[in-house]
Amino acid sequence: MTPQDAIRLFGTQAAMARAFGVTEPAVLRWRKLGKFPPLRVYELPAAIERHKASQQSSETALEAVERV
């Protein structure tokens, strides 16, 4: 997976940066290079899981607000 593919999966560079715990300029560098730094490759599955979990918690909160 390239950084560009990952950005599509996360939706935005900002969301991807949050999932990795890095700045948006770091994600931009990865995108320009066309690859992840070696240690970040290993973090990718965990970052994807964190992103999915944050989306689910956001959806749950939105549903609770809509019920009120």
Image (cartoon, helix red, strand yellow):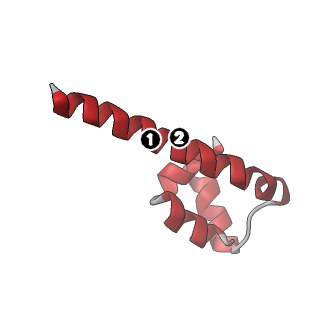
Which disc number belongs to residue 40? none
Q: CA distance from mark 1 to mark 2?
A: 5 Å
Say which quadrant the N terminus sits in: bottom right
For the residue carrying disc 1, how many other residues have a C-alpha within 10 Å: few (<14), some (14-19), or many (20+)? few
Instruction: Check the image and report above or below for 56 versus 30.
Output: above
Residue 28: quadrant of the picture: bottom right
Cβ atoms at labels 1 and 2 below 8 Å apart: yes
Q: Residue at x 44, y 41 (%)?
A: 56
Q: Position of residue 40 (x, y in %)?
A: 77, 54
* Image location (x, y in percent) of residue 49: 62, 47
Residue at the disc numbered 2: 53
**Identity of the residue drawn at 49% across and 39% down:** 54
- On residue 56, which mark appears? 1
> Percent x, y for residue 2?
67, 72
Q: Amino acid at mark 2?
A: Ala
**Residue at the image point whose x is 43% and y is 35% from the top:** 57
Viewer can see residue 22? no
Residue 7 drawn at (x, y percent): 54, 64
Residue 8 horizontal side relative to residue 29, left or right = left
Q: Quadrant of the C terminus?
A: top left
Q: Is residue 23 left or right of residue 68?
A: right
**Residue extending furthest toward the front:** 67
49 or 29, which is in the foreground?
49
Nearer to us in this view, 23 or 59: 59
Residue displayed at 38% across by 37% down: 58
Question: To which quarter of the image does residue 63 belong?
Answer: top left
- Dot 1: element: helix
SS category of the residue bearing label 2: helix
Mark 2 nearby-residue class (10 Å; few <14, some 14–19, many ≥20):
few
Give the amino acid at mark 1: Gln
Residue 17 visible in rendering = yes
